[in-house]
Image (cartoon, rainbow, N blue to C red):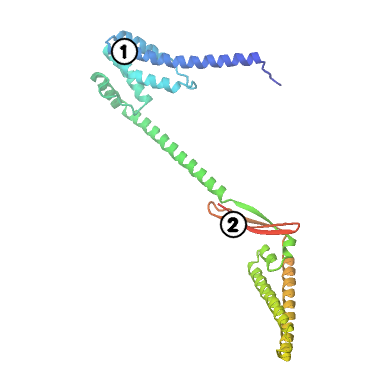
Amino acid sequence: MCITFSPLSLRVVAVVVAVMSSFSWFASADTRSEFEIGRNLFSNGQYERASEVFAALMAEPVDPRAPDSKKQREVLQAARPLFAATLVALGRGPEADHLVLEQLRDDPFYEPPAGQLPEPVMQRFVAVAAEHAEELERQRQVILRDRQEAVAREQREREAQRQAEQAKNTAATIVVTRRSRLVALLPFGVGQFQNGEVGRGIFFATSEVLAAAASFGTLIAAQHYAAVDCRFEDCDAARRGFETVRTVNWISVGLTTALVVAGVIEAEATLVAVDRTTQKRAALGWTFEPLVDVGPGFASFGLSSAF
């Protein structure tokens, strides 16, 4: 079943809501005005008229769903002791005691403001409170227990929220690491570093650099011996030196080539193209992650950090 509303019906609903809201506001203002009228009549000694105003005020029902129900209850709680004082002044003590008991049951912690009510009325509050002491004490204990439970519940909710936030901050996350086979072809331990094998990366990087340095050094030495002028220097010594450095050059070039090839083979053999690991994310602190970017004709390496 489908229900539709015409623009006219929607306007009617809006008007009704506005009228009800304004009526609630005026009702609250009316309650306050009646209270002020009754209080002024009581202050001027017009107890009969004051009792009529207070009786009408107390007879007004309070809708707990109304937005101003709290203010209305506050007005009634302020008017009830004055109504009781009015009844005492008129000699209607039992009715006044009934109002006093109603006030104490409504708020068992209530105490009449000192100096604002006549002494006979203050004495009636004391007498009624003493007569119903056990009942009022039980009600106080219930209220205190409810307040303690509310405080404990609020603390539990805050603790649960704190634990949820902490669990969220330290929750396990899946980290996906992607590695490139092009990067694994690079010499000087780059493939090992990409695979996370720092020790092997340092070994291949150091050994390849030393072997390459030996190759360049012996190449320069061989060129020096080859340029010796036999008219002025010992050609036999130069020839022996040339043969020696050439042999060392061949060895170092071969060693460099072997290390580079071995490093590439090892990096390619141990490469895991896509690696998924589960780790807990720390709540606070700096995190570092290596960055590798490979494209046509270039390769870049870096380190990223986040807080």
Q: Nearer the viewer, residue 306 or 57?
A: 306
When asked about the image quadrant of residue 259, the answer is bottom right
- Relative to 4, say whether 155 is above or below: below
What residue is at 74 percent from the left and 67 percent from the top?
Answer: 269
Q: Nearer the viewer, residue 203 or 188?
A: 188
Numbered tag placed on residue 40 in the rendering: 1
In the picture, which quadrant includes the N terminus?
top right
Distance of label 1 from label 2 (alpha carbons): 76 Å
How many numbered badges does the structure rendering display?
2
When asked about the image quadrant of residue 241, the answer is bottom right
Q: Horizontal and vertical percent for residue 166?
A: 53, 48
Q: Horizontal and vertical percent for residue 78?
A: 35, 20
Numbered tag placed on residue 238 in the rendering: none
- Secondary structure beneath label 1: helix
What residue is at 67 percent from the left and 71 percent from the top?
Answer: 204
Q: Horizontal and vertical percent for residue 224?
A: 71, 81
What residue is at 71 percent from the left and 77 percent from the top?
Answer: 215
Label 2 sits on residue: 288
